[in-house]
Image: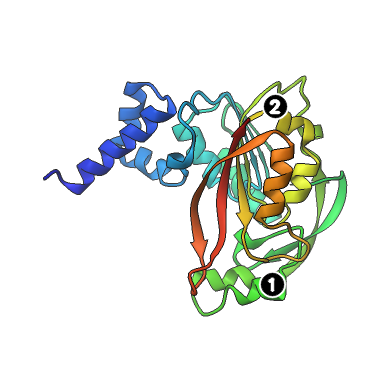
Amino acid sequence: MLPEGLLEARRRVRTLRRLGLPAGMASKLAWTRAGAAAMGKLPLESFPAGSFPVDVAVDVGAYDGRFSEALLAVLRPARLYAFEPTPASFSVLEGRLGRRTGVVIRRCAVGARTGRARFHTYECGNGNSLHPMSPEGQSLYTGEDHAASRALFKETVEVEVERLDELLPARDVPEISLLKVDVQGAERGVIEGAHAALARTRLLMIEALFVPHYEGAALFPELDGLLRAAGMTLHALGPGWHGPDGRLLHADAIYRRA
C-alpha cells in the first residue's frame, strides 16, 4: 500500500491535469509543500475540466487576499483584479498582492449601484457585509469557538460601492476566465450590477447561502434563478459549512457559461 502522502500528491496531479495544466507544471505544484498548501485554499475538484488556462481572474470580496494568492500560485492568471471594501482587510490585501505584476486591487464594495454605503463589520472579518446580520444568522454562530466571532458585531464604516460593469469595461477586459464572488449576502447586488461582465464570464464561483444569514440577502434558489437568466449553468457545489444540526448553511456554487 502506498503512503498516504504519496497518494495525496498523485491525486493533486490528477486534479491539475484534469483542469488542463501541463504535466510539468502540475507535478511541480502537486509535489511541493507550497503548491499543496495553495491548492488546499481552492475548490479545484469542483471546477470543470479544462478550466485552465486562466487569462483574467476577478476576486470580488477579496478579504485579505489569501484566495487570490492561491489562485496566482496554482492557475496563474495573466491579470487579476481584486476588490475589498474593509479598511483593515484591504491593508492586508495590499501588503500581500499590491506589488505583484498583473494584479490590480481596489478598495471598494461591489453592488447594483455606484455610490457610498454603510458596511457592517464583525469580529471575524469574513462575516463583514453590506447587509446587517439577521437574528437568525447570529443564532447560527454561537459558543466560544472561532466561528462564533463571525456574528459579534464590531462597527459600521462607510465604503465606496461600484458596479462590476463599470470596474471591468469590455474594452479593457473582453473576457473573464474566472469570477469569484464572496460578499456575505450581497450577491444579488453584485449580479444586478454585472450583467455585461457576466455575459463575458466563462466560470463563476459564488458563495451561496442556504439559510438566512443577513437581512435582505438572497438565498441560493433566487441566486440560481438570476444566474440562469444570465446564461450561466450550475456545474457543482463545493464543500459547504454545516450547522450543529447538520443543515447546510453556505457553500461555493460553481457556474459555467451555458
Name the residue nearer the viewer: 137 or 101. 137
| Amino acid type at mark 2 | Arg
> Does 9 sit left or right of 229 as displayed?
left
Tag 2 near tag 1, CB within 8 Å = no
Residue 219 visible, this angle? yes
| Amino acid type at mark 1 | Phe
> Does 219 sit left or right of 72 as displayed?
right
Label 2 packing within 10 angstroms: few (<14), some (14-19), many (20+) = some
Label 1 packing within 10 angstroms: few (<14), some (14-19), many (20+) = some
Q: Alpha-carbon distance for marks 2 and 1? A: 37 Å
Question: Where the C terminus falls, by quadrant?
Answer: top right
- Which type of secondary structure does the marked residue at label 2 adopt? loop
Residue 153 marker: 1
- Where residue 144 appears, as percent x and y from the top left, is 50, 79
Q: For the point 49% across and 74% down, which residue is it?
A: 245
Q: For the point 32% across and 22% down, which residue is it?
A: 24
Residue 206 marker: none
Disc 2 marks which residue? 200
**Picture layout, residue 74 above or below residue 222:** above
**Picture layout, residue 26 above or below residue 8:** above
Mark 2 vs mark 1, foreground winner is: 2
Question: Where the N terminus falls, by quadrant?
Answer: top left
- Specify which label sits upstream in the sequence, 2 or 1: 1
Colouring scheme applied when the structure was drawn: rainbow
> Does 42 sit left or right of 91 as displayed?
left
Residue 108 visible, this angle? no
- Where residue 113 appears, as percent x and y from the top left, is 86, 45
- Where residue 92 appears, as percent x and y from the top left, is 59, 49
- Which type of secondary structure does the marked residue at label 1 adopt? strand
Res 175 quadrant in image: top right
